[in-house]
Amino acid sequence: MAISRARLDRFLCKFPQFNKHSVRLLLAQQRVVINDTIETASDCLIDYFTKVEVDGVVLQNNIPHYVMLHKPIGVVCATTDTKHKTVMDLLKYSYKAQLHIVGRLDLNTSGLVLLTDDSRWSERLTQPESKVEKRYIVTLANAIYEDYAQAFEQGMYFPYEDITTKPAKFTKLSTYQAEVCLVEGRYHQIKRMFGRFRNPVVALHRHSIGSLALDEQLTVGQSRELTASEVKTIFDLSAINCCT
């Protein structure tokens, strides 16, 4: 859900103790503090997560939430579902109804799922121009051959949608297992790419998004909140070491 933004003066005028005249005076006298910085512009835009203080009194200080989940196979990335357990059913947080899913995994894919109530952060993670890499461990039914890497790194054309996938980094790990790095997430993309080689995907596991790897301490179905450092630095290694 997108976070709406509003002018600072209009936000302040919603409080009964303020009116248009008093708000102008407060701003001129440098008595309004936004995110710990004095603000004097009436048209400054704020949102649900902007900290607002007047004369040292906090009027708004909503804290965003960021969660990583170790998604099991057989659980859907949805808020509700009539047939399957959802990722929301696995969460125990009091604020879980506020969260939305950042980059879904299908029913039979396991691994790292992120959830947040901060749409600014999730939009940055998912927008194509950010080129945030997603890394998967893929287990295949048949042996992997050397020509796979070139096909993945060149991109593949899918005539049904009339699109060519962006270059993906392919690393062979063993006879039947590989790591694939994507900077996009089209419908069943990895399974369809291996389908070009008539090699069915037996298991698919996402182990990292950007610089954030799935916490090895989390067992399947468990979750934890991200640290402030993880929230900030998830973008730092985006597109590095990944074909773009």
Image (cartoon, rainbow, N blue to C red):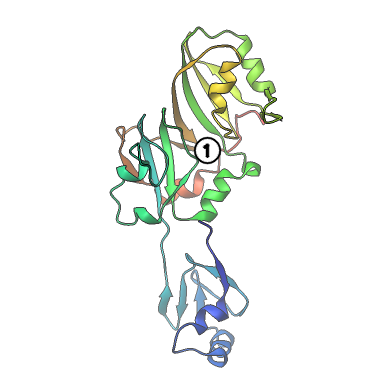
**In the figure, is residue 194 to the left or right of 162?**
left
* Relative to 13, 239 lies left or right: right
Question: For mark 1, does the 10 Å Cα neighbourhood hold few (<14), some (14 to 19), or many (20 or more) residues?
Answer: many
Instruction: Answer with the quarter of the image where residue 171 lies.
Output: top right
Which residue does the image show at 59% across and 21% down from the upper left? 193
Q: On the image, numbered disc 1 is attached to which residue?
A: 210
Q: Amino acid at mark 1?
A: Gly
Q: Is residue 107 above or below residue 116?
A: above
* In the foreground, 226 or 152: 152
Identify whether 182 is placed above or below 90: above
**Furthest residue to the front?**
82
Q: Residue at x 38, y 46 (%)?
A: 80
Task: Tell me the quarter of the image containing the C terminus.
Answer: top right
**Residue 31 showing in the rendered view:** no
Q: Position of residue 14 (x, y in %)?
A: 48, 82
Left or right of 171, for residue 96? left
Q: Residue at x 35, y 53 (%)?
A: 96
What percent of the width, then of the height, locates residue 204? 45, 24
In percent of width and height, residue 208 lies at 47, 33
**Image location of residue 38, percent across then percent down:** 54, 76
Please determine whether, in this image, residue 112 is positioned above or below residue 190: below
Q: Say which element carries label 1.
A: loop
- What is the tally of numbered marks visible in this picture? 1
Quadrant position of residue 236: top right
Q: Nearer the viewer, residue 105 or 51?
A: 105
Q: Residue 237: which quarter of the image? A: top right
In the image, 80: left or right of 140? left
**Residue at the location (40% across, 35% down)?**
214
- Res 238 seen here: yes
Q: Is residue 97 above or below residue 107?
A: below
